[in-house]
Image (spheres, rainbow, N blue to C red):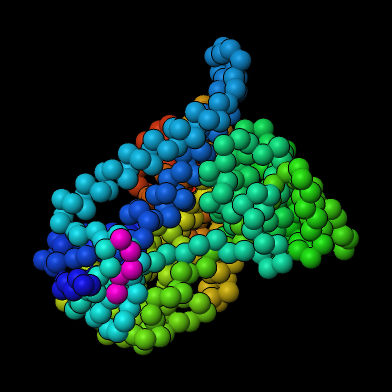
Amino acid sequence: MMQEREYDLVVLGGGTGGYTAAIRATQLGMRVALVEQEKVGGVCLHKGCIPTKALLEAAEVLARTREAARFGVEVGEVGLDFGRLQESKRAAVAALYDSLQRLLQRHKVEVIAGRGRLLSPGQVAVEGPEPARLRARFVLLATGSRPRELPGLPVDGRRVLTSDHLLEMEALPSSLAIVGAGAVGVEFASFFLDVGVPVTVIELLPRLLPTEDEELGRGLEKVLVSRGATVLTSARVLPEKARLYDDHIELSVEHDGQEKVVRASHVLVAIGRRANVEDLGLEDAGVQLADGFVRVDGQMQTDQPGIYAVGDLVGGPLLAHKAAAEGAIAAEAMAGRSPRPLDYARVPRVVYTRPHAAAVGLSEEEARRDGRRVRAQRFSFRYNAMALIRQETEGAAKVVVDAETGDLLGVHILGPQAGELIGEAALARYLEASAWELGSNVHPHPSLSEALMDAAQLAARISIYL
C-alpha cells in the first residue's frame, strides 16, 4: 500500500536551489522532505560547476608549469595524466557530495529517492524505490535544466556530445569543434587548448560571450586565438549537411558568405539549456509557463498559491548561486517573512577560462539602451603591479558608471582571478556604491584588486593617471 506522509514543505529537486530552500526552511521551523531522483547536489555538483572547474584548475596548473622557466624555475618534462585528472575531479565531487549529505542530515531534511510529480496544489506523488504520496502546505519546484540539442544534429554520446558526455570521457579527443560560445563553450575551449587539443569555436552571433559586455567577448576571442583556437563568429552550422564517419565528423558552416567544412574528432553542442518542466504535473496544479520556464513573482511563488519555483526552472541567469539566493527567498516567503526580491543586476557572473571573464550589473551596451548617460572606464592589467609580477597581463577591469549620478552600474573584468575580484564589485552593487566610493576604498598593494580600484578612480576623475 502506498505510503502517505505530511510535511510543511516538499521540495522537488535536490540541486543548489532545492537544498538551500530545504535547509533554510528547517531553520525556520518547517518539516521538510526533499525528493531527488538522482543525487542531491544536482547539475552544479555532479555535471556542471564543480567538475568543470576541477578540470580547468588542472589545466591552469599545467599551463603555468609549462611557463615556469619565465620565472627562473626549472622543471622537468611536463605532461598530463588524464586518467589521474579524472580521478582528482571525482574525488572533489565525492568530498562535496558527502559533506552535503551530512549537512542535510544535520538539518533533518528527509531525502526521498524518486521522481516527484504534482497531483494538485499541496499533493505530490513520488515514483521510485519506495512510492509515496506526500501532502504539504507548500511545494517548491527546483528540477533544474538540461543541455539543449541542435535541431538536425542529434546528440549520440559518441561523436556529438553535450557537456555531460565530455566530463566523463576517459581519453582526450584528438580535436574538438564547439558549437556555441557562451560560458560552457568557451570554458571547454580554454581547457582543451591548455591540454593540447585543437579547438574550433562556432558562434551564431557576432562575438564570444554574446550576452556579456562586448569588450569581454572581444578580449576573450583574442586570448583564445593567441593560444591556437580557430574562432568563427556570425557563423551558422548547417545540421542537415553534417557527415559522421568512424573516426571524425564534418560540419558544414556558413561563414563570411561562404560554406566551410569544419572537421573534428568530436563536436560539443553548447547552445544553452532548457528547463526540466516535463511530467511535473504543472497543468494539473495550475502552474503557468512563460517561454518554457515556470512563471514566478518576486517571492518565487508561481501563479498557484503555495507552489514556488527556483533556479534554472524559472529562467534568468542559469547560475547555482542565483538559485541558492532564490531558494532562501522562497523559504523565507513561505515562513511569512516577506523577503526582498532578488535584484538580478547584482548577481555576479563568472566564466572560468584562462584568464577569467567576470561581470556584475549592466554592460555598457545595456546601460546605453536604457537611455542613460554613461561613462565607461577601463584599466589594463598591463599596468597592474601584481599582474606584471605574475606575468598574467591580458585583459582589463572596466567600470560602467551613470555619468550624472556617478552610480556604479556594472563591472566587467577579463583577467587573472577575475572570478575572485568580482565579489568586491558585487558588494559595491549591493550597497549601491558610486565609482568614487569604490575608487576611494583603500586596496592592498601590490594586488590584482587594484585594477578595479584604478578603473573606478579614473571614472570618478580622482586618479593619479589622469
| Position of residue 33 measured from the top left corner of the image (x, y, whole percent) | 22, 65
Residue at image position (46%, 50%) is 47
| Position of residue 163 measured from the top left corner of the image (x, y, whole percent) | 56, 51
Residue at the farthest front position:
1
Q: Nearer the viewer, residue 68 or 394?
A: 68
User: On the rendered structure, is 330 left or right of 273?
Assistant: left
Q: How many marks?
A: 0
| Position of residue 442 measured from the top left corner of the image (x, y, whole percent) | 35, 42
| Position of residue 200 measured from the top left corner of the image (x, y, whole percent) | 73, 47
Q: Nearer the viewer, residue 80 or 56?
A: 80
* Res 374 quadrant in image: bottom right
Residue at image position (67%, 43%) is 224
Residue 201 visible in the shown view: yes
Residue at image position (43%, 59%) is 319
Assign the magenta stretch its main secondary structure. Answer: strand
For the N terminus, the quadrant is bottom left
Residue at image position (16%, 55%) is 107
Q: Is residue 220 above or below residue 435?
A: above
Magenta segment boundaries in residue numbering: 125-129
75 within the magenta span: no
Q: Is residue 273 above or below residue 105?
A: below
User: On the rendered structure, is 74 left or right of 450?
Assistant: right
128 within the magenta span: yes
* Res 288 quadrant in image: bottom left
User: On the rendered structure, is 228 left or right of 320?
Assistant: right
Residue 432 visible in the shown view: no
